[in-house]
Image (spheres, helix red, strand yellow):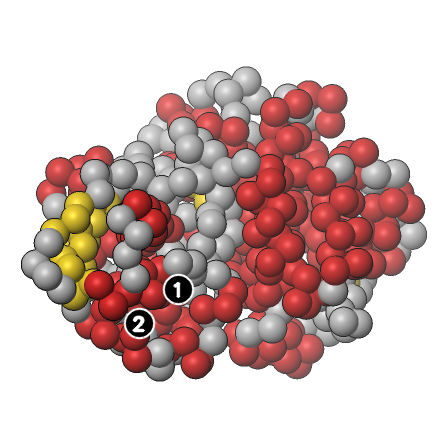
Amino acid sequence: MHDFTASLGYDDLPPALLGLLRRSFLDTMGVAALGSTTQMAQISRRGALALFGPGGAGAARMLLDGRLVSPAGAAMAGAFTVDSIDAHDGTTPNKGHAGSAVFPALLAVADARRAGGQPVTGADFALWLALAYEISYRAGQVQHATCPDYHTSGSWTAVGVAAAVARILGATPDQIRHAAGIAEYHGPRSQMMRCIDFPTMVRDGVGWGAPTGVTAAYLACEGFTGAPALTCESDAAEPFWAGLGVTWLTLAHTHYKLYPCCRWAHPSLDAAQALMRKHKLTHSDVAGVDIRTFHYATRLAGHEPQSLDDLAYSIAFPVAAMIVRDRFGPDELTPETLNDPDILRISRATRLIDDAEMTARSVQQRWAEVTLELRDGTQLTAPPGTPRGDTDQPLSDAEIAAKFHSFAEPVWGQAQATEIAALCSGFDALDGPGFARLLDLLLTAPAH
């Protein structure tokens, strides 16, 4: 891993991987724009200002804010900002997300270097993204295979961020080893199901995974030791690192979301929408809903969410919103939606059924079957399905762009969102001034 990280070049990146990174850049920045309006993001920015002042590593601007903190502080605030809207890209085998940690961390370090007189090009940033994603994905697969508890994405993205930031800082291969080990050791081994059962702002752990990775890289470059990272160098890890640089897990396993809520609810959302449209129903026709799905998804109860954190980790309420409004998007992420009587009626009448076969299959894909019970007693069932956005049912470029604009335009305005979309969609071709322009757009407070 450390030799690969030290030696990989931009020209080694497959064209398909570059295309995926462009798509993830656009998608993640749309989520960040919407996330910047949340209470969770506002709190994290205040925390970063209070605790992470600029130091010897230089000053970095916080995502969609512009105020200066350290790179670790900007990584923390940015990761919490993206994670506050559960709509960013993910990886199904890892049951988690890399982009929500990787983008804020690397943007923070890139901005600090730019401020220090070291220009960053789009090709540089693409290389760092590729390293952070791939190492995160592989470390995460090892962790899921070797640890008894289901840990958040912050625990394994810390390793990928550390390796990539160490590369940015010009670390030796041995220093990269130590950076990964420091990040793994100190990364947030937080329990994901605790946040599913008791949703709060702690979310997916990336708010600490991102700054842990940044901090680990700077420490390693100063001589701090921490190797080996067991997710990279143990005997149990070895099979998961086979083919590194030849086979890209980032390409094989990255999915995208249509809806701003936990991925485990998405097949049910797709199925409910399809049934309503196929049979030309209105919500007043629906008396109840049965959702048959895998075990983890049944713990996304959320029949009467009391906060937007509850809503993010629910299934009954988003499905009810889809039945009532034929959509589940930014407009549904409001306190007013939580009190919508039509949505609450259907949400309360939704039953979640734990299906053993779907649970067995859920390691690779998320399955659900939805049945609508109508007021006249008719039952309509959609066949079991997996969510759109997986690699076997990819979202089109037009769908990704439409999602970005629906999230971003209320925050940035149409003109600035359009410019950001164009720059993100070709970011790796930007020269130093071009990438600096993108940083300026992303890391300053929106004027709109």
* 46 in relation to 426, above or below: below
Q: Which residue is mark 2?
A: 343
| Disc on res. 80 | none
Q: Is residue 208 visible in this depiction of the protein? A: no
In the displayed structure image, the side of residue 159 where residue 12 appears, left or right = right
Tell me the amino acid under the disc marked 2: Ile
Place of residue 287 in the rendered image (x, y in percent of width and height, measured from the top left): 16, 66
Calculate the distance from the C-alpha at mark 2 to the C-alpha at mark 1.
9 Å
In the picture of the structure, the residue carrying the numbered disc 1 is: 325
Q: Quadrant of the N terminus?
A: top right
At horizontal 30% and vertical 52% (from top left) the residue drawn is 280
Q: Give the quadrant of residue 91.
A: top left
Q: Position of residue 51 (x, y in %)?
A: 64, 77
Q: Residues within 10 Å of mark 2 (few under 14, many from 20)?
A: many
Instruction: Please name the residue shown 61% across and 25% down the image.
Output: 16
Q: Are marks 2 and 1 in contact (CB under 8 Å)?
A: yes
The spot of residue 130 in percent (x, y) is: 62, 35
Q: What quarter of the picture does the C terminus occupy?
A: bottom right
> Disc 1 marks which amino acid?
Arg
